[in-house]
C-alpha cells in the first residue's frame, strides 16, 4: 500500500464544489468513483483545499493510498480512463506516508480572470467575469498591493471554524493584462472561505470608481469597518486554483 499525490485539473462548471456531498456531483465524489474502479477501498481521499461550486482548478492536489502493481504513468492513465471528461489527472507521484495535501501545504495560488465589455460573450464568459463599466488597470494594480503581508482578513472572508484565526500572509497579489483580459494572481499561506472572490470584487469596485482604496486599507486595519466596503463576491466561474506548494 503506497500513498500517492495527485495533481488534478477540472472544469468546475458542472460540479457542486470539490467536497463530497450525498446528493450532488462533486470533484471528490467523481475522483473516489474513479479510484474504486482501480480497486481502491478506503473511506475518502483528501484534497488540498475546498473549491466552491463553479470554481475551476489546474493544480488541485489530492492524496490517496492504493495497492498499485504498475508504474506511475499507468496509474495516471488508468485514472483518466475512469474520470469524466471535465476532470483530468495531470500527474501522479509517490508521497511520504505522512503527506497530507491540506496540512502539509505551505502556500496556495489562485488566478482570477476578467474582461471589460458592454456586450456579453457566451464563449468567453465560461471562464472569465465580464465587467462593465470598464476597470482602470493602473488602479487594479495599486489596489492589489494593499493586501500584501500578514494581515487580519476577517473583513474579506470567513474562517473554516468560528474560533479559527483570520490572519493570513499574502506573498503575491498582482494583476497582469493578457489577450484582452485582466488576470489576478494571489498567493498566500492559506485563504479564508470565499476570500479570493471577495478580494477581486472589492478591487473591481475601486477600479470602477465605486469606492476608494482607503476604505480597503481601513478594513484591514480595523475589520469592524467592513460594512463600508461594497457587498458582493466575484462570480465563481472566473476563479481557478492554480498551484499548491509544499
Image (cartoon, helix red, strand yellow):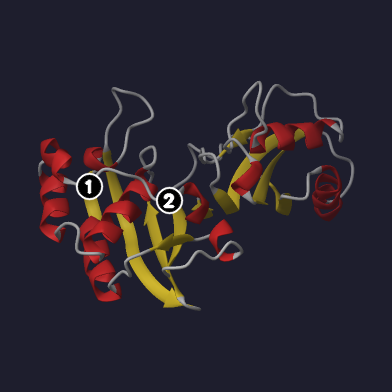
Near mark 2 (Cα within 10 A), the count class, few <14, some 14-19 or many ≥20, is some
Pair 2/1: label in front: 1
Q: In this view, does 23 lie to the left or right of 229?
A: right
Residue 219 placed where, x, y %?
15, 45
* Res 224 visible: yes
User: Which is more toward the observer, 120 or 43?
Assistant: 120
User: Which is more toward the observer, 194 or 241?
Assistant: 194
**Can you name the residue that lies furthest to the bottom here?**
179
* Res 2 visible: no
Residue 63 placed where, x, y %?
65, 38
Whichever of labels 2 and 1 marks the residue nearer the N terminus, that label is 2
**Residue at mark 2:** 107
> How far apart in space, not on screen, are marks 2 and 1 (Cα)?
28 Å
Picture layout, residue 92 above or below residue 212 = above
Q: How many marks?
A: 2
Picture layout, residue 71 above or below residue 39 = below
Q: Which residue is drawn at 36% across and 46% down?
A: 233
Q: Residue at x 66, y 45 (%)?
A: 5
**Residue at mark 1:** 230
Corner quadrant of residue 146: bottom left
**Can you name the residue that lies furthest to the front here?**
119
Where does the N terminus fall, quadrant-wise? top right
Near mark 1 (Cα within 10 A), the count class, few <14, some 14-19 or many ≥20, is some
**SS assignment at label 2:** strand
Amino acid at each position: 500500500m503506497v500513498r500517492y499525490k495527485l495533481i488534478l485539473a477540472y472544469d468546475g462548471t458542472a460540479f457542486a464544489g470539490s467536497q463530497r456531498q450525498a446528493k450532488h456531483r462533486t470533484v471528490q465524489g467523481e475522483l473516489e468513483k474513479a479510484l474504486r474502479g482501480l480497486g481502491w477501498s478506503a473511506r475518502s481521499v483528501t484534497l488540498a483545499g475546498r473549491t466552491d461550486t463553479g470554481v475551476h482548478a489546474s493544480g488541485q492536489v489530492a492524496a490517496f493510498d492504493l495497492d498499485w502493481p504498475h508504474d506511475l504513468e499507468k496509474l495516471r492513465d488508468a485514472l483518466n480512463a475512469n474520470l469524466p471528461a471535465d476532470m483530468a489527472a495531470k500527474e501522479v507521484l509517490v508521497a511520504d506516508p505522512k503527506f497530507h495535501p491540506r496540512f502539509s501545504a505551505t502556500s496556495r495560488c489562485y488566478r482570477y480572470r476578467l474582461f471589460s465589455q458592454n456586450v456579453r460573450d457566451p464563449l468567453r464568459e465560461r471562464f472569465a467575469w465580464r465587467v462593465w463599466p470598464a476597470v482602470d488597470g493602473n488602479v487594479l494594480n495599486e489596489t492589489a498591493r494593499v493586501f500584501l503581508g500578514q494581515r487580519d482578513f476577517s473583513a474579506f472572508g470567513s474562517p473554516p471554524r468560528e474560533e479559527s484565526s483570520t490572519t493570513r500572509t499574502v506573498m503575491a497579489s498582482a494583476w497582469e493584462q493578457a489577450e484582452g483580459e485582466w488576470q489576478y494572481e494571489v498567493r498566500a499561506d492559506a485563504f479564508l472561505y470565499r476570500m479570493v472572490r471577495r478580494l477581486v470584487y472589492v478591487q473591481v469596485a475601486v477600479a470602477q470608481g465605486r469606492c476608494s482604496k482607503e476604505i480597503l486599507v481601513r478594513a484591514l486595519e480595523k475589520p469592524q469597518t467592513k460594512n463600508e466596503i461594497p457587498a458582493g463576491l466575484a462570480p465563481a466561474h472566473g476563479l481557478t486554483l492554480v498551484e499548491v506548494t509544499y
